[in-house]
Image (cartoon, rainbow, N blue to C red):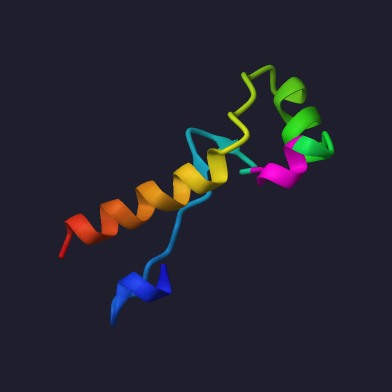
Amino acid sequence: MREIGGDRIIIPVGYANDMIGYIPDAAAFESRAYEADLVPRMFQVPTFRSDVGTVLVQEMKSAVLSLS
């Protein structure tokens, strides 16, 4: 985000709709880590796709660039 933000301060927000969430990376899915495996079951929500982190960063960059 720093590389595309220039002089703007970009603060990704990690809390929405009363839910504190985790964005697991691909390695977490491969190892069935806490944030990829247990958290969705604890909150009874669907799991993310294994590329969720990459997709999220790409979409955030796209959103920031659209503001330019």
Residue nearest the viewer, comparing 31 with 5: 31
Q: Choose top left, top right, bottom left or bottom right for residue 35.
A: top right
* Residue 18 among those drawn in magenta: no
Q: Chief secondary structure of the magenta span?
A: helix
Residue 63 location, x and y as percent?
27, 52
The one nearer the camera, 57 or 18, is 57
Q: Quadrant of the C terminus?
A: bottom left
* Residue at the image position 46 percent from the left and 53 percent from the top: 13
- Percent x, y of residue 48: 60, 29
Furthest toward the left, the residue is 68
Q: Residue at x 32, y 71 (%)?
A: 4
Looking at this view, is 54 or 13 the one in front? 54
Q: Which residues are magenta?
A: 24-29
The residue that appears at 64% across and 24% down in the rendered structure is 47
Counting every numbered tag in the picture gives 0
33 horizontally vs 29: left or right: right
The N terminus - image quarter:
bottom left
Residue 21, position as x, y percentages in the image: 62, 40
